Amino acid sequence: MARRPRKPRSSFRSLYAGADHRTMRGNIAAYLEWMEVHSYSEDSVETRAQVLHYFATWCEERGLLRSAEVTRPILQRYQRWMFYYRKKNGQPLGISTQYERLMVVTIFFRWLTRNNYLLYNPASELELPRTERRLPKAILSVEEAEKVLAQPDLEDRLGVRDRAIMETLYSTGMRRKEVAALTIFSLDQDRGTVMIRLGKGKKDRLIPIGERAMLWVEKYLREVRPELAMEPDEGFLFLGGEGTPLTPGYLSDTVRSYVDAARIGKKGSCHLFRHTMATLMLEGGADTRFIQAMLGHVSLSTTQLYTQVAIRKLKEIHTATHPAAKLTKKEHGQESEGSAVEVDRAELLAQLDVEGEEDGEQG
């Protein structure tokens, strides 16, 4: 199966090495170093470096080289510039993109003020754009999901691996980076759980995985992985043809190719299965708190609350509401119990949609 080559990701963080500490670039370098010292993830540091690079470049084109030269009217000009900016394809920046870029800038100036680089914060009263609350662009039905899952060639060892990967995505709703980081020690076959180490926000979480997905993973471990693994074996669960760990980009290209091959009239990749898992479990009667626990969301913007749930109860809800959690489909009349907070389901799904854009993978 042909896959598109991916361009290596350039590092915006490296652009600030050796910058004059008296300039805005020097201030950005100090801020990024502070993030690293305080254990922000590499992706978070790189993302903020990129956003601040855009802002610093815009300022420099207007003769503004120092952070102290930036005022609230200048930030408002930058906000208007982003609103009217058009990409190479003629499309404007999305409202969520504008919001995220301005938010990073406001956080940067708040940090400068708190650390005495500036006497006052010019972004303290900046009014950010109202973000859209959109429903997901594409969700798979149970029949569509099964059609995508049936695409890999099971006569090919990589086809068995790909089926195990997609079953895992469908069953657990994991992010693509989390799937890529799984090891052979992440799975507890007896309890039917998987441990995600250092997920988004560097948080661990233990979540259920359905019987069917577990059987496909076991088949892959038994029949395929021993042929792919090479010494020294680092223990990553899913391996490429060369015996190396899979990258998130490779996972996206692989899953996208199967979605396209299924000819269901929908586009998407790993995040499409994340969205689908959440939607189908909600439709099956799962309380939103349990979906939050599965997805690893600390809070939703509507509530800023999170209720920790026991893995046994979470496993029970997963089995009762996920259409592929059991090998044989059963009717479950069970309703979720103890719902302390009823969270807006549309908000959860809308947040998933935004999350997909932030992850660089829509669908």
Image: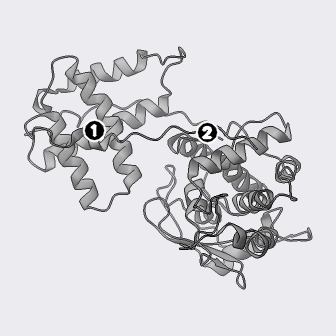
Identity of the amino acid at label 1?
A: Thr
Mark 2, residue position:
362
Identity of the amino acid at label 2?
A: Gln
Q: Secondary structure at mark 1?
A: helix
Is 24 on the left or on the right of 247, as rendered?
left
Residue depicted at x 53% and y 41%: 360
Mark 1, residue position:
106
Q: Nearer the viewer, residue 1 or 248?
A: 1
Q: Is residue 216 visible?
A: yes
Picture quadrant of residue 175: bottom right
Q: Nearer the viewer, residue 175 or 125?
A: 175
Picture quadrant of residue 325: bottom right
Q: Secondary structure at mark 2?
A: loop
Residue depicted at x 85% and y 71%: 326
Considering only vertical position in the picture, is 202 above or below 362? below
Considering only vertical position in the picture, is 286 above or below 93? below
Of the two numbered discs 1 and 2 on the same chain, state the one appearing first in sequence. 1
Q: Give the CA separation, mark 1 to mark 2.
A: 26 Å
Picture quadrant of residue 318: bottom right
